[in-house]
Image: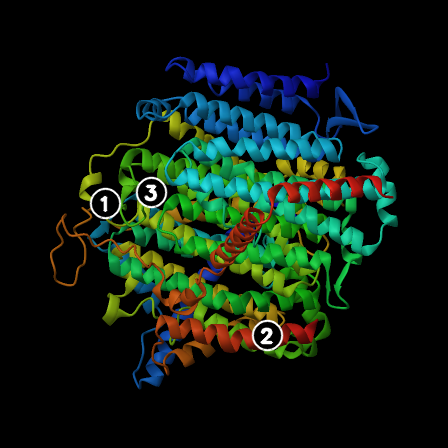
Amino acid sequence: MTHLDLLLLVALINLPVAWWLAGGATRRRLLALPYGLMLGMLLYMDPGATWDSGLSWVFLGQSLSWRLDGLGWFFALPTIGAALAAAAYSSGEWGEDFAGAGGSMGWLQLALAANVFAMLVLLAAGDLLTLFIGWELVSWAGLPLMVLAGGAAVGAGIRYITYAMGGGMAVLLGVVLVYVWTGSLVPADFMAVLPTLASWQVGLLVALFFGGFGVKMALLPFHLWQAPAYGLSVGPAAAFLGAISSRMGLFAMALVLVKFITLERLVDLTVIPGLLDSRDVLAWVAAFTIILPTYTALKQNDARLLLAWHGIGQGGYMVLGLVMGDAMGSAGGLLHVFNYATNQAVLLLAVFAVMHRTGTADLNRMGGLIVRMPLSFLALLIGIIGLAGLPPMNGFVSKWLVYRSLVLEGEPLLFLAAIIGTLGTILSVYKLIHNIFLGQLRVEHEDIREAPWSMTGPMLVLCAVIVVTGTMPGLVLGVVADAQQAIGLAVPDYHLGGVTSPAGGLDMLWLNGVIMAGFAVGAVLFYGFGGRTKRVHQLDNYAGGHFLTADVRYQYSDNFYPGLMHHIGGWYRGSFQWLEGALISVVDLLATALRGFYHQAQPAAWVLFTITLGFAWAVLP
Amino acid sequence: MSITELLLELVLMPIVAFVIGLFMVLMMRRIGARLQRRVGPPVFQPLYDIVKLYGKRTQVSHGLMHDIGIVMAVGGYVAAETLLPMPGMNGIAEKGGLIALLYVIMIPSLGLALGVGQCANPNGSIGISRALTAMLAYDIPFVIVIFGVAWHFGTTNLVEIIALQQAGGIATWGAVEMPLLAIAGLFGMQAMLGKQPFEIYVAPAEIATGPMVEMGGKYLGGLFVMQCFQLYTAAVLYVTLFLGGGENWLFFLIKIFAVVAIPMSIAFLFPRYRTEDLVGLLWKWPVMAALIGVALVM
């Protein structure tokens, strides 16, 4: 049994183990243990090497197998890490309350374990068929996690699986076409034939795979399912799904489009002669995915949905960096998978910690919680700085690499799109932290306590990861380099603090060093000079001659950016919802017409006609 | 360069920036006074103001984040100054570059926003909402400018951008080779400094000075210090991108004071735009000029 087999076996055994552990309050304390073991096993495996499985399978004369290379290893790291954080978070008070409220901890932990196993199977895919098997496992495994909360979450889950099935069919068709056109599903074999295929054939494969994988990534226009499906789930499940689940789409894109088909071939596929090639199309899909969901997030009044919409937008940066294909851009795109996973996990865990205490995620029903939940505030603060891509957090490094690539590659409009996304994120996350933690503390929240250590602990550990990998990005860039090499991309000249480049590098050790030194100077100036500060009550406030009282709600929260909405408010027309509704109507109409047609005619005659046609198709040359 | 020399530069650069910033504040007040036919303040008035504010007996705090917000506002700019080359001192400009600088100077804004937020005064929050909207408005033309400059010079390294301009003389200055970008940059700078007609987030009569509504004593003093750094940073960034940086201290000072004088002079002649008008204006003319400017350099 190889190391990879052992890892997959532990992930598989964890399914019943997680179910069993979830069954008792004392046993629940150990929920994170299997993921800790898996993380240890993964870290033991060198990401620069290829780890083969002892399992092999012959299908249609093809020798099919599993192997974990640098790319799979890189995605496996945040997968197991996110599961570890989610399991630890749910192992204490949260789990007790969830079970006490009638929720099934067993199903939650079983579904979480199933997701990790399915994702590892996908990440270790050695050929297109095992990739498809893993893909379907991942698609279906996500559903139970989404619907656990019941109510609106069930509808969101059903919407998700409808999209996922459509995406899966596109991927399946792509796999079948590769087999029909190249005679093989084994990479070494079909990659030798792919260059000989006509442009329209490769173009069709690109469309099918990008569309299929894009559904999981929630790229435009297949993005509508994701925010409610992730955001309305229960806390740890939402954090896990939001952090890593949809990134499986990026893994598959990197493998199929970058490694198998290659970016050079994408550039050769002209869409509009002299103006647009297929790589440009992919980049622009990514750019619109950055902008539109980010500004949709800005409008949300539910903290969970706000973050979930940002998750879609952040995926755009990953795809954009990846398809730029140069050393910096692809490193940025891949690094953002890790950085985003840490940021989004901590953000969702913090929001659910607040929800755990206040019972609401409505941004118009909170405020001033910084004085009651300081650790959760700190976690959210670090998370939003990372998500917005500001120094000194890790999100800055990955976005910097993407920006840098776009500048050097001469892509002004894509660069502008990326920055517009970042600016929108800054506005949105400020609204998030302001409406939850800043401003007026409501009377009903006066007696709220900080979330328990079982919840704040995982959040603070993730915060430490964000800060450390923001200061020393080289720790992750090494693994990113292995992933880049695994798919045949150039690797940036990296070091512990960042990257070096003749056209301008980045050293976060120095940058964060001077930022911290600057804060130290600011602190000395503030605390070392001037009179002593006197803390006043929140109602001791300038109110233009009026007296404030606790029963007056004066928090500024609703329609937070009216000046901006004056300009962009009209853009929120729900065009994509309209498109989705129109598509559903068309399918519904067709189904009704066919059903009516079938009932009107002789059913037996139609069956005979169909069978005859089928035979004719099979027999005739 | 030895590590000792580098550390010395890192200490000196913010101090020099602050001193120059004080004189920029003085110049700003003097320009206003001249335009309004007043005498204007004495030379050391900006320094007196800071000492006075820090020395006030009543220092009202609305909580830890209120305090830390001021620390971040000042500290962020202290860090930013080490990324901006000045004559004879490059600090860590080569370890960060243009894009990193752009993001480091957002840290003070974030600090201020967090600090104001904890004050629990809706006027302050409305001010921050407007300030962030303004940031979105002016940063869009400004990042197009940043792109154009980086593409034109083939680097994001500020030291190299200066060297390339100085090697070719005035004819190779960014303002000469990229005049449209220079104009768009000037537009953006006016808004970035929050000067009229783009100071809607302060609006004293409407929202009681917005972000400053709960700031008194050393909190306001900290913001005063921040303003000194902000003026210096904007001016040096513009000179670095478009006016060949500082060949020596004399030219450097002339250039940065001249650059700051432009928005200051304009500020005292214009009334205030509403937020939506500000956004509309910044998304129209400077964006158009910057996009044409980028098209011309590519």
Inter-mark Cα distance, 1 to 2 = 46 Å
Crowd band around label 1 with a 10 angstrom C-alpha radius: few (<14), some (14–19), many (20+): many
Q: Residue at x 86, y 48 (%)?
A: A195
Q: Residue at x 19, y 40 (%)?
A: A444
Q: Amino acid at mark 3?
A: Ala
Which is more toward the observer, A427 or A241? A241
Chain that bears disc 1: A
Q: Quadrant of residue A106?
A: top left
Inter-mark Cα distance, 2 to 3 = 44 Å
Q: Nearer the viewer, mark 1 or mark 3?
A: 3
Q: Secondary structure at mark 1?
A: loop
Decide if residue A358 is in sight here: yes
Residue at mark 2: B181
Residue at mark 1: A441
Q: Quadrant of residue A152?
A: top left
Rendering coords of residue A87 (x, y %)? 46, 25
Which is more toward the observer, A444 or A572? A572
Q: Earlier in the sequence, mark 1 or mark 3?
A: 3
Establish whether labels 2 and 3 are both on one chain: no
Q: Are marks 1 and 3 in contact (CB under 8 Å)?
A: no
Q: Nearer the viewer, mark 1 or mark 2?
A: 1
Establish whether labels 1 and 2 are both on one chain: no
Residue at mark 3: A361
Q: Residue at x 69, y 48 (%)?
A: A208
Chain that bears disc 2: B
